[in-house]
Image (tube, rainbow, N blue to C red):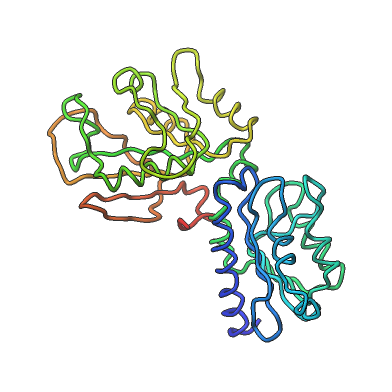
Amino acid sequence: MNNNQLLTDEKFMRRCLQLARNGRQNAKPNPMVGAVIVSPDGRIIGEGYHVRCGEGHAEVNAFASVCPEDEALLHESTIYVSLEPCSHFGKTPPCADLIVRKGVRRVVCGCIDPFAEVSGRGVERIRKAGIEVTVGVLEQECLTLNRRFIVCNERDRPYITLKWAQTADGFLDDHGRALPISSPFTKMLSHKLRAENDAILVGRVTEEREHPRLNVREWSGPDPERIVLGHGASVTGILARLYEEKKQSLLVEGGAQTLQSFLDADLWDELRVETAPITVGDGTPAPSLPDSAVPTGQQIYDANVIRWYGHESSMGAFRARP
């Protein structure tokens, strides 16, 4: 592939990723997917994304958006898809078969679908029909977008994010007393994160001391399932139940013992650590970063620093936040 073709493919794959993110709330438990159809002269003649689980996939919506006068161009066009087209009958027919019927000249997909019923079969079916297929354009970005879907399918558990806020000298509170560490803006971002997760968990001590509501008040979106890790409840049991219920993500907000229990069990995929420019001298120590934590991003708001870390075991697939 020449450099000009690669740059063109990356441009349209970025559009696929933009479209795919529109399905963040309603596509679950399916992955977020975007599709763009480009005519031989470089014009987008169709695009779509997977809006809602059980409804048409991105490819279906993209083909449906093509104007009748552009239908004749499909045989010379390229369809870009952020995730490999499905090859199995689920709630909808296989998208690989639809692409073959439409007879496009070329298919470009960002990454292979890790779902066991697809995993390369969609690409194979399209190639057997004589259609050119390119795989791996903006692959890391495409994998990162659906990291929760991927972890859930590969590890049989939800994607786990551990989150805490600490003082500059490394404490979660002020001599055991609750301390507002987040600013109003970073608190809003925390609620945004809640809206993006299927469940949220705290420990029994945090529940008894702070009575947190654990809902979404500062952002628009659904409340995650509220879970308290109390007596008789095990982390493995909770994770198994969430997986059976097809809940793909869990946000753990505290307290210190609960966070440490997940770290000790190496049950985490992402860490979000907010640090405020205040010191208290003593209090409940914040968890220490594990050796497996790899920095993936940093943001500064109102002098508070939010740092993101990924687990080194996943860095091959997830190098950056979308």
Tell me if 122 is positioned left or right of 207 in this view. right
Above or below: residue 158 compared with residue 103: above
Which image quarter: residue 291? top left
Tell me if 285 is positioned left or right of 150 in this view. left
Q: Between residues 318 and 78, which one lies in front from this camera angle?
A: 78
Q: Residue at x 80, y 60 (%)?
A: 96
Question: Looking at the image, which residue sits at the far top?
Answer: 232
Q: Residue at x 40, y 46 (%)?
A: 293
Above or below: residue 158 compared with residue 236: below
Q: Between residues 124 and 40, which one lies in front from this camera angle?
A: 40
Q: Between residues 219 and 42, which one lies in front from this camera angle?
A: 219
Q: Between residues 135 and 216, which one lies in front from this camera angle?
A: 216
Tell me if 132 is positioned left or right of 147 in this view. right
Q: Residue at x 44, y 22 (%)?
A: 228
What is the tally of numbered marks visible in this picture? 0
Above or below: residue 121 compared with residue 248: below
Residue 46 in the image: x percent, y percent?
A: 68, 71
Above or below: residue 67 compared with residue 241: below
Q: Residue at x 37, y 56 (%)?
A: 297
Residue 246 in the image: x percent, y percent?
A: 63, 35
Image quadrant holding the N terminus, namely bottom right
Tell me if 109 is positioned left or right of 199 in this view. right
Which image quarter: residue 264? top left
Residue 101 in the image: x percent, y percent?
A: 86, 67
Residue 27 in the image: x percent, y percent?
A: 62, 48
Question: Looking at the image, which residue sits at the far front?
Answer: 68
